[in-house]
Amino acid sequence: MRLNSYEFMIARRFLVNGRSQTVLIILGIAIGVAVQVFLISLMDGLQRNLIQRTIGSSPHVTIAPPLSSPQPLGIGGGAIDDYQRPLKTEESEILSWQRYSDYLSGIEEITVAAPMINGNGYIEKGRSSFPVLIKGVTLPEADVIYKFNKNTVSGDPRPGGNNVLIGRASSDKSGLKVGDTFYLRNQTGAGDYFSIKGIFDLGSSAANNMVVMSLDRAQNFLDITGISSIEIQVHDVFAADGLAESLRGSLSQVKVESWQERNQELLSGLQAQDTSSAMIQFFVLLSITLGIASVLAIIAIQKSRQLGILKAMGTNDKSAARIFIIQGFSMGFVGALLGILLGLGMTSLFMFGTKSSGGPTYELKITLTNILLPAVLAVLSASVAALVPARRAAGLNPMEVIRNG
C-alpha cells in the first residue's frame, strides 16, 4: 500500500479540526494501554511471587521409591484374605541412589540433585514432646534448594555430627535456642541427644517444623541404609513438568513427581488469574476499537462534502480510505506512547508506595514484552477500527454528496 503525502496532510487536518474528539480518543487509548501495562506487570509479579513462596525453598522435581502393593502370603497353594507383611510405603529406601545421582548430574536442565533422608520424630523437653520432621541432607547440595546460608536466622547453617539445625516453628514451640541440647526420638522410639547449631526460617510452617542433620547421621539415627528421595531443582521452574516426564521414561523403579503435580490448586488459581487478566485486556481493547470507530465514523459523515470534492478532483477510493486508516493509526500510536509512559509511572508509583510502608509485598515484573504487547495491540485495534469509516469514505459518490450538500 503506497501512501501519498497529501493523504497525511488531509488526515492531520481532519484530526486538528476535531481536536477535542482527537484528544479524548488519544487519552482513552493512553489510559487503556497504561492499565494493561500495570495489570500485566502486577499479575506477572504476583504469580512469580506466589510460585517463589510455594517452591522457592523446595524441590522442583522429587524422585522417591515407588508405592508397592503388598501381596498375600500363599498357604497350601492358596491365598489368605489379610496381609501378613508390613506395608511398604513411599518412605521406603532408594538403595542404589548413587546410580541415579550420577545420571542426573549429566542433565543440563538440572541445577542440583540432592540426596535426602526423611523421617518422623519428636523432641522431648521435660514432660512435653513436640512432633518434628527429621531431614538428612548433604551440603552444599541441600543449600541450593533450601538456602540455609540465607535463611538461617541464628547460629551456624552447617549441621554435622550431633549438631543440627531446627526450624523456627520447632524452636518457638519447644523454647529451644542455639547452643541448647535436647533429646530427639525417631519413629521407632529410639533416641539420642543433639545440640542446636542454628535456627532457620524457610517461610513455611511445615518446613519450619524440621530438624536438619547430616545425611550419614540421619542414616544412623533412623536406621536407614539408602536414602528417602532425591530432590532436584532446575533452571526454569516451568520446565520441571517436562523434565519429570522425561525422567519417568529414563528411570525405573522410582516415582518421579514435579512441583506442578504437587500444587494443582496453585496452578488452577494462576490459570484463573490469566483468564481474568485476558478478559480485562479484551474489553479494554474493545472499548478502544469502538471509541475510535465511532469518532472516525462521525468525522466521515461531517467531512462527506470535503471528501466528495477530493474525489471529484481525482482522489480514488483507496486513497480516501487510507486517509482514515492514517488517522486511526496516528491516534493509536500517540496514545500507545503516552500509555507506556503513564503505565510505567503507575508501576513506579505503586512500588514506591509499597516500599515507603515497609517494603513491597511483591515486585511488579516489568519486561519489554509486558510494555510492548499492550501498545502494539492498541495500535492494531485503532487501525482496524478505522476500517469502518474508511470503507464508508471509499464508497462515497462525489456527485451525489456535492449535489445534496
Image (cartoon, grey):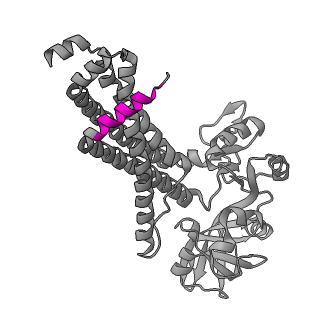
In front of the other: 68 or 218: 218
For the question of whether residue 287 can be seen, the reply is no
Relative to residue 264, is residue 243 drawn left or right? right
Relative to residue 394, is residue 359 drawn left or right? right
For the question of whether residue 297 can be seen, the reply is yes
In the displayed structure, would residue 310 be above or below residue 268? Answer: above
In the displayed structure, would residue 168 be above or below residue 37? Answer: below
Residue found 45% across the figure and 49% down from its top: 40
Give the quadrant of the C terminus.
top left
x, y (%) of residue 76?
A: 72, 33
In the displayed structure, would residue 155 be above or below residue 97? Answer: below
Is 8 a magenta residue? Answer: yes
In this picture, which residue range is highlighted in magenta? Answer: 3-16
In front of the other: 147 or 265: 147
Would you say the magenta stretch is mainly helix, strand or loop? helix
x, y (%) of residue 36?
A: 40, 47
In front of the other: 313 or 8: 313
Residue found 67% across the figure and 71% down from its top: 148
In front of the other: 277 or 396: 396
Residue found 31% across the figure and 38% down from its top: 15
x, y (%) of residue 182?
A: 65, 83
Q: Quadrant of residue 291?
A: top left
Report the residue that reaches farthest toward the bottom: 179
